[in-house]
Image (cartoon, helix red, strand yellow):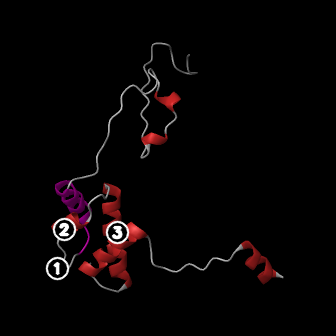
Amino acid sequence: MELDGFGSNTEIIVIAATNQPEMLDSAILRPGRFDRRFTINLPSARDRKAILELHAKNKHFSPNVNLSEIAEQTIGFSGAQLEGVLNESALLAARRRSLYIEPQDVNEAIDRILIGSTVKKDFLSKKEKISCIS
């Protein structure tokens, strides 16, 4: 099989990623399709601290905030989730009109990443919307 625009001597490398490899159809995993598979594990405590340090640059923390403690509290978090914790912490501090991120901001941000926001959302069912319009 040849793809339009590519000569037959051109090598094409396809890279795919998934968080749920067990959900892939076995046909896609047959030899000759995706021959190499590897796993990228979640970061260790040391790695999490390094990721937090990277994303902590340009953010202002209270002296009470300890990135090593945050790294220990965030077992199972991905790099993106760790970045989200610090960004959410900064937003929470800003909402309090504080110049500094405090431990309570970080703790709430971790909770939000784990279980979602505590902001109540009022959604109407389709039936309720129709009765409001009538």
Q: Which tag, 3 or 1, sits closer to the chain's start?
A: 1
Number of residue marks? 3
Give coordinates of residue 36: x percent, y percent. Answer: 36, 28
Q: Is residue 120 above or below residue 78?
A: below
Determine whether label 1 and label 2 are within 8 Å by CB: no
Asked which quadrant contains residue 55, the reply is bottom left
**Can you say which quadrant of the picture contains the N terminus?**
top right
Asked whether, in this view, residue 82 is left or right of residue 129, the answer is left
Quote the CA–CA distance across marks 3 and 1: 18 Å
Nearer the observer: mark 2 or 3; the answer is 2
Q: What amino acid is at disc 3?
A: Asn
Asked which quadrant contains residue 129, the reply is bottom right
Asked which quadrant contains residue 132, the reply is bottom right
Query: Disc 1 designates what residue?
Result: 64
Give coordinates of residue 16: x percent, y percent. Answer: 43, 36
Q: Secondary structure at mark 3?
A: helix
Give coordinates of residue 57: x percent, y percent. Answer: 23, 65
Query: Disc 3 designates what residue?
Result: 87
Q: Secondary structure at mark 1?
A: loop
Q: Which tag, 2 or 3, sits closer to the chain's start?
A: 2
- Residue 102 shows in this picture: no
Q: Which region is colored magenta? A: 45-60
Assess whether residue 50 is covered by the magenta stretch. Answer: yes
Query: Disc 2 designates what residue?
Result: 67
Give coordinates of residue 126: x percent, y percent. Answer: 73, 72
The crowd level at tag 3 (other Cα within 10 Å; few <14, some 14-19, many 20+) is: some
Going 44% across and 30% down the picture, which residue do you hit? 14
Q: What amino acid is at disc 1?
A: Asn
Going 32% across and 55% down the picture, which residue do you hit? 78
Assess whether residue 77 is covered by the magenta stretch. Answer: no
Nearer the observer: mark 3 or 1; the answer is 1
Asked whether, in this view, residue 58 is left or right of residue 34, the answer is left
